[in-house]
Image (cartoon, rainbow, N blue to C red):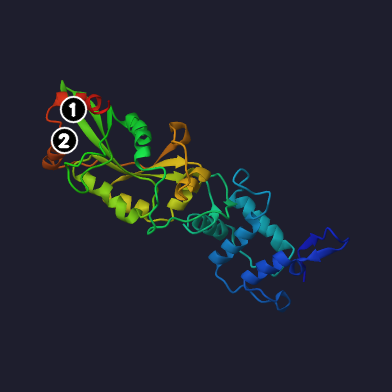
Amino acid sequence: MARARFQDNNSNHPTTLNQNSTCKELLSKLGVDNPETGNSTSVNTMETVRIVSEFLLKDEHISEDKAISAQDLFNKYQELRESTQDLPEINKNSFVVYLSRIANTPGSKIICPGRRRGYYFDKNYTPLDDEEETGDVIREADLYSLAKEWLFEKCDIAVDVSQKTANRAWGNPDLVGFKLYDILNKTLFEIYTIELKLTPDGWRRWIFEAVSHTRFSNRSYFAFLYPENWMSKLEGEDMRLYAEHFRIGILVLAVTEELYKRVKNNHQIAKLEISDVSFIEYLPAPYISTRPKFRNEFLTNLGINNYRQLHQYGESIDT
């Protein structure tokens, strides 16, 4: 039976796959503890792809800056298989599909920074925690001015209303924006709202704050800080399904992995600047027609009772 060959730096003789300690560990994880007996793998195909991919992606030449495609990773596995019959055969399409699913799983350390950007292994990746709350050093309020810059790209007026309380529990968004339309000498407008959290921790609870705003907001967003190169992990969460079902949008304030971890670990960080953040509209908010009663109550509690006050609202609040 053929064996994969590795050159021993301390010897002129090559070693076989099952003589190499690292590869022995791989075979063991696959349930092929005794290759000489011809044992087949004892794990399913998806788990096999995960184990093999982690093994191959731990190569020191593969990193975030040098991520490799699913095709290249499959080819590496084929090269390994050609030298040994101990490793199971995996169909290419199955390998690619399972690799994508694994990278989208929140707990997986296999990272895909984005479509067509390859894969790499991140031993330091920490999955989302839906229960543990984050102790704020950088506070949510520190993000409001950043999110307002994004809101200005959508709206004519954008205001931090996080200190307003007149709309009672779950009726006070952090930011509100107004997109104005002048139609036949009459002002029409859409209301945008953002409910912003420091991280997505506990999102299954907090997302309903954004949902509650849809009774008066035409486009409601749930927003949070998150590493740009972990975006594929959000696909493994149910967040998109919740947002689509309840018809809200998701806005990600994308930062570097290093900065995000410092925030999560409560390290002292200088004030975040707009240059530290890129905005990713992970899921655009669909337009929702609101009931006049709820819309009027919201505007009245903001102190907007006519079109003139609407046009001057941002100017009178932002001093």
Q: Is residue 64 left or right of residue 12?
A: left
What is the count of numbered marks?
2
Up the image or down, 181 lies above or below 216; here it is above
Q: Quadrant of residue 277?
A: top left
Up the image or down, 91 lies above or below 301; here it is below
Image coordinates of residue 162 in percent, x first then y, are 26, 39
Image coordinates of residue 74 in percent, x first then y, are 63, 56
**Residue under numbered circle 2:** 299
Q: Which mark is residue 310?
A: 1
Q: Residues within 10 Å of mark 2 (few under 14, many from 20)?
A: some
Which residue is located at x 15 percent, y 31 percent? 304
Q: Is residue 88 left or right of residue 271?
A: right
Which residue is located at x 59 percent, y 46 percent? 64
First reached walking from the N terminus: tag 1 or tag 2? 2
Which residue is located at x 55 percent, y 70 percent? 44
Name the kind of residue labelled 2 in the image: Leu
Which residue is located at x 15 percent, y 20 percent? 185
Measured Cα–Cα span from mark 1 to mark 2: 9 Å
Image coordinates of residue 196 in percent, x first then y, are 33, 43
Name the kind of residue labelled 1 in the image: Leu
In which quadrant will I find the N terminus? bottom right
Q: In this view, which residue lies farthest toward the right?
A: 12
Image coordinates of residue 17 in percent, x first then y, are 75, 66
Q: Residues within 10 Å of mark 1 (few under 14, many from 20)?
A: many
